[in-house]
Image (tube, grey):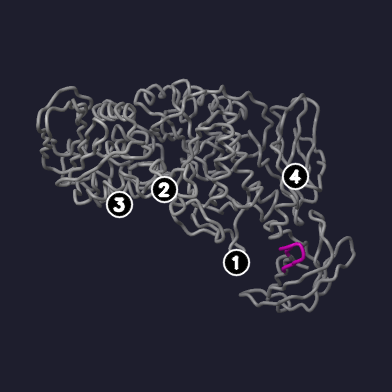
Amino acid sequence: MNEYFIRAYLDDYKLITIEMDISFFGGECKRFDLIKDEVIIPLNFISKTKKNTYFEYKYSFDTDIVISQPYEVMGINGYTTPLVYRYIVKTEQFNQQYYYDNDDLGSVVANGITTFKLWAPTANNVVLSINDKYFKMNRNDVNGIYSLSFNGDLSGSIYNYIVSVNGNTYTTVDPYGKASTANSKNSVVANMEKAKDSELEKTEDPIIYEVAIRDYSEEGTFNGLIPHLDYISDLGITHIQLLPVNDFGSVNDYHKEIYYNWGYDPVQYQTLEGSYCSDPTNPLLIMEEFKNLCNEIHDRKMKVILDVVFNHHYHALRSSFNKVVPYYYFRYDENNKFCEGSFCGAELDTKLKMCRKYIIDTLVYFVRQFDVDGYRFDLMSFIDVDTMLEIEKSLKDFKEDVMLFGEGWIMKTGEKQLKLANYSNSKLIENIGFFNDEFRDVIKGNSFDCCATGYGTGNVWQAKKAIEVMKAKRFYKSSQSINYVECHDDMTCFDKIKHCCINEDFQQLVKRQKLIISCVLLAKGVSFLHAGQEFCRSKQGLQNTYNAPDSINKINHRQKEEYQNVIKFTKDLIEIKKEYCFGLADVKYSEKEGTIIGKYQDLTFIINPSQQDFIYSFKGKKQVILNEEGKQDFVVEKELVIKSITTVVLKEL
């Protein structure tokens, strides 16, 4: 039987779906049989449905199938086609039967023995290709694990798996591989020492600083970021969030100058990105360099957050997931196509036990191996709530104060049955944060309209809305609000200011940058700054620079001199924020003439985004501890003129 015209799928333990193209004998066949080792297993007709280009047949059968064994379906004129293990892998029975709970998948070196383990329950054969030699792996029918052990430490050995499944044979990297040769070609055995335990104290009021490895240094490597860590630490940052550092597909490790990409196109989740290594020909060196970077960050009393992309995969069909257990790891729609609600790639089916385990194992690995302190989840709303709760529980077993947050936009997804980790379910995952796009748009102006103004860009009529977003009322807990106006996405804040405040002079634009930064730092919740925001970073007005050249994305460190006053203002306000823990504080906000007045303990802060001065009257005397120039120390009595486009912080005497 020509596989192009007829396809047979095992969709449950007793259910076979057959598709027969209308172009092949009109799609008509009165009988199909299941065959194993030339023995016919009768099928029981259930239904026949006409689709656009084929007829769909449903059949049941009474015999127990042995998962992984190759079967065929025979139809018209005696033609046969392989029986493909399809949606049976989605069933509860399959997930219970083949769940594997141990933490030893991949290549593991222990006690002088190197062991390889691969979860491939539907595969009928797996061969380990290692250092140009081939070894048939042993199957455990209880859990679908293929394994093989060798005496000795095989660190540095190059290997792949050759998987026979559904009538096809694929060569693939190890989904649990910790290292690989350049450009994701082969897995490499790694037996590396873990990063030293930082033992940093819990951060009461986090200030996150988002960094793209390639942007921040001329080299665009892990090593290249290290000389800049003193500056970031001196700014007062508590957490450095790194854009994706795991292996991604859009940049050639040997010729990274040709293409730029942020890295939201994952290929190998547990392997680091080769283009960030000083020598991409050395698969183990990158692990050492990343470990060293994490240690250097921790040595400066800052924490490491990794940006992870578990909502989609770069190329599902070519992925190790699809080659090892086809149809398992991704969501499918009613037309049997990959669900791609993010428009970025196929969605991972996070509710399935071994997919969920893979995500958790990956996150635990980076915490244990590199001592990372938290994760930012790209398009977190594509992950189900139960998985996020399991992630939190598992990670807190290793690091009690692990920080977890992500994008909670409500988007179309292939998952219809489960609650997803979006804004509307913040109460269900109360210890996980969300990027607050409402805060962003109210303070800065709508990100999708470069000319739209917000409170910080002069729209004083938004004062009451600004107070609401600064209170973080959108979420179940204020600590869930990640307050930001700029990240890698969209225009930089300063580019946006230049567009929507086009009639203001340069000094006014810079004052707006300071004022907007003050809104981020004085709001209730978690403060989030994008690298370079504190020195008016520009991306030449472009909205989406995910694949723009280095000339657009590289940070111009010379700007630090030009905008030293903005850096000083940011640093000084961070010091005040740390002293008073505004993010956790019960600040009392009010509004007068478009100016926001916040009061907490013995502090008062006034935010005046208008082009008019504002007179703030009070009883007695107060100490000015911050104005547009940064930290101050002088006393005022009864009233103070708050200059236009200025934030001032006062202290009771």
Task: Provide the residue designation for mark 2.
Answer: 476
Q: How many numbered marks, from 0 up?
A: 4
Tell me the kind of residue under disc 4. Ile
- Which residues lie in the magenta part? 9-17
Which of the pair 482/291 is nearer the observer? Answer: 482
Residue 471 sits in which quadrant?
Answer: top left
Q: Residues within 10 Å of mark 1 (few under 14, many from 20)?
A: few
Q: Is residue 612 left or right of residue 495?
A: left
Mark 2 or mark 4: name the one nearer the start of the chain: 4
Task: Provide the residue designation for mark 3.
Answer: 446
Q: Are marks 2 and 4 in contact (CB under 8 Å)?
A: no
Task: Provide the residue designation for mark 1.
Answer: 335
In this rendering, which labeled residue sits more in front, label 2 or label 3?
2
Tell me the kind of residue under disc 3. Asn
Q: Residues within 10 Å of mark 3 (few under 14, many from 20)?
A: some
Distance, label 1 to label 3, CA atoms, is 36 Å
Distance, label 4 to label 1, CA atoms, is 30 Å
Distance, label 2 to label 4, CA atoms, is 48 Å
Q: Is residue 465 left or right of residue 408?
A: left
Q: Residues within 10 Å of mark 4 (few under 14, many from 20)?
A: many
Rendered view: 381 above or below 603: below
Residue 602 sits in which quadrant?
Answer: top left
State which quarter of the image contains the N terminus.
Answer: bottom right
Rendered view: 339 above or below 432: below
Q: Are marks 2 and 3 in contact (CB under 8 Å)?
A: no
